Image: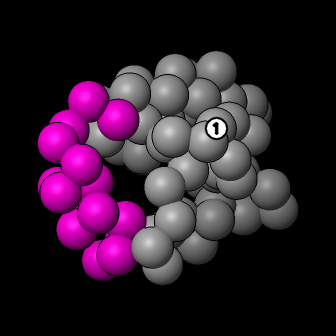
Amino acid sequence: MDNCFALGRQCSILKKTECQGCSFMKSKEEYINSKRKSYNRLASLPEVRQDYISDKYYSSRKPWLTGGEDYAI
């Protein structure tokens, strides 16, 4: 797929140059929609759970609340 979100010179997820049959293959639009959906889900969680997730995976940042970095490419 020529418009895969992870494809530059090679795949940024699997370090391959061939997308055929890749289960990670998504268009940029699909990737943005997926990211937006996951951030909406995170924003709906109780604050205590959001704090735990932001500390563990986002260096204490909460981009799902601010629409900050990586919200959409």
Residue 10 is left or right of residue 64, and the answer is right
Residue 51 is left or right of residue 9, and the answer is left
Q: Is residue 51 magenta?
A: yes
Q: Position of residue 60 (x, y in %)?
A: 45, 73
In this orientation, which residue lies closer to the viewer: 56 or 47? 47
Residue 15 visible in this rendered orientation of the protein: yes
Answer with the quarter of the image where residue 37 lies.
top left
In this orientation, which residue lies closer to the viewer: 51 or 40? 51
The residue stretch that appears in magenta: 43-57
Q: Residue at x 82, y 62 (%)?
A: 9
Q: Main secondary structure of the magenta part?
A: helix
In this orientation, which residue lies closer to the viewer: 9 or 38? 38
Q: Position of residue 46 (x, y in %)?
A: 17, 42
Q: Position of residue 50 (x, y in %)?
A: 27, 54
Answer with the quarter of the image where residue 40 lies.
top left
Q: Position of residue 11 (x, y in %)?
A: 63, 61
Quadrant holding the N terminus: top right
Residue 5 is left or right of residue 35, and the answer is right
Q: Residue at x 70, y 53 (%)?
A: 69
Which residue carries the number 1 mark? 67
Up the image or down, 49 lies above or below 45; here it is below
Say which amino acid is labelled 1.
Gly
Q: Is residue 11 magenta?
A: no
User: Residue reaching furthest front?
Assistant: 47
Up the image or down, 11 lies above or below 65; here it is below
Q: At numbered mark 1, what does the secondary structure look like: helix, strand or loop?
A: loop
Total count of labels: 1
